[in-house]
Image (cartoon, grey):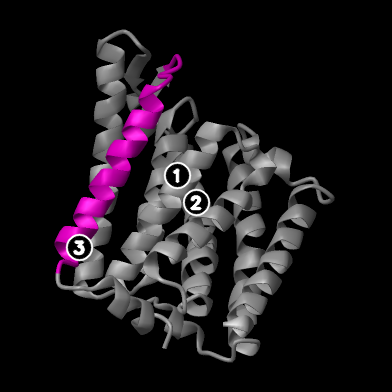
């Protein structure tokens, strides 16, 4: 127990320091909120990739365990879940924005013109890679590494501890109360997927497509397939709750024969 906690504290300090140094002394934070998607993608890969590599190296040389034991396999059920997760998430957001537009909350229109531009596909790919790297990093650290070293906790305590730390790591973006609730809730969803599947890949794809869709596939970005103006307000929270519920239902349905407690042991041995 003491060794696990010591490693958790150490890896958190390492990652927190790396995040701080990359975002502020090196001045990369401004690019994560820039409209230039090529710079956003490049900086995103760097900011997430370096801490991800550090975490994997720590696991390999300090924990002295093969990186593969964190769970990177893609079984048939994992592929099915990932495809459904991506499809359902994109569909939910499109329907959500279209309904919001129909009732006059926002003004939305399909960005069909984008498909005629070659730069659209390049930026779409680069942005996707950036969000994949971010999801990979956070799932490796907050789900994979944490579960490996907190396996002595009960499932409930595991959810609480990992969600709190996940939330704290987003302090650089500001943490109003609603963001705290959302971050902790999303952490629990991704942890549930990981424990049900025994693999990081399904949670990575669920995490990736949520960020990618809510930030770039809909909205005002250059690669938004469905552009909209206006503020949905409380409806943003509603769609997040619907998204989270859909992911849990998908995981419970597809991995119905899996037990959480069994997988806690499985993903850490």
Question: x, y percentage for residue 41?
Answer: 58, 48
Q: Residue placed at 49% from the left, 30% from the top?
A: 222
C-alpha span from label 2 to label 1: 7 Å
**Callout 1 environment at 10 Å: few (<14), some (14 to 19), or many (20+)?**
some
- Percent x, y for residue 7? 64, 78
Mark sitting earlier along the chain (3/1) = 3
The residue indicated by pointer 3 is: 80
Q: CA distance from mark 3 to mark 2?
A: 21 Å
Which residue is nearer to you in this view: 58 or 5? Answer: 5
Q: In the current view of this chain or complex, which residue is farthest to the bottom? A: 64
Secondary structure category for the residue under label 2: helix
Residue 257 picture quarter: bottom left
Q: Position of residue 101 (x, y in %)?
A: 30, 14
Q: Is residue 29 magenta?
A: no
Magenta stretch contains residue 232: yes
Q: Is residue 223 above or below residue 249?
A: above
Q: Which residue is mark 1?
A: 211
Q: Which residue is mark 2?
A: 131
Secondary element under disc 3, as helix, strand or loop, is helix
Mark with earlier residue (2, 1): 2
Q: Is residue 172 left or right of residue 256?
A: right
Report the span colored magenta: 229-256
Q: Quadrant of residue 229?
A: top left
Residue 44 against residue 152 in the figure, above or below: above
């Amino acid at each position: 127990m003491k060794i696990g906690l010591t490693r958790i504290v150490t890896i958190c300090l390492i990652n927190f320091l790396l995040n701080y140094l990359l975002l502020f002394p090196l001045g990369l934070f401004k690019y994560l909120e820039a409209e230039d998607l090529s710079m956003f993608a490049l900086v995103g890969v760097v900011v997430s990739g370096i801490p991800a590599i550090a975490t994997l190296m720590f696991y390999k040389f300090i924990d002295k365990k093969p990186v593969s034991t964190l769970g990177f396999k893609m079984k048939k059920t994992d592929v099915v879940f990932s495809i459904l997760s991506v499809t359902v998430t994109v569909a939910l957001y499109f329907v959500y924005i279209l309904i919001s537009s129909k009732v006059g909350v926002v003004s939305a229109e399909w960005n069909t013109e984008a498909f005629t531009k070659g730069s659209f596909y390049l930026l779409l790919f680069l942005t996707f890679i950036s969000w994949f790297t971010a999801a990979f990093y956070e799932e490796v650290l907050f789900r994979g590494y944490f579960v490996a070293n907190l396996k002595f906790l009960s499932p409930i305590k595991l959810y609480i501890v990992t969600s709190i730390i996940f939330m704290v790591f987003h302090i650089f973006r500001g943490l109003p109360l609603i963001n705290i609730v959302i971050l902790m809730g999303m952490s629990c969803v991704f942890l549930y997927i990981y424990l049900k599947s025994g693999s990081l890949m399904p949670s990575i794809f669920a995490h990736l497509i949520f960020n990618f869709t809510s930030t770039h596939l809909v909205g005002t970005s250059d690669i938004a397939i469905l552009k909209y103006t206006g503020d949905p307000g409380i409806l943003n929270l509603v769609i997040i709750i619907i998204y989270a519920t859909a992911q849990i239902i998908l995981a419970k349905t597809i991995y119905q024969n899996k037990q959480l407690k069994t997988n806690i042991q499985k993903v850490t041995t």
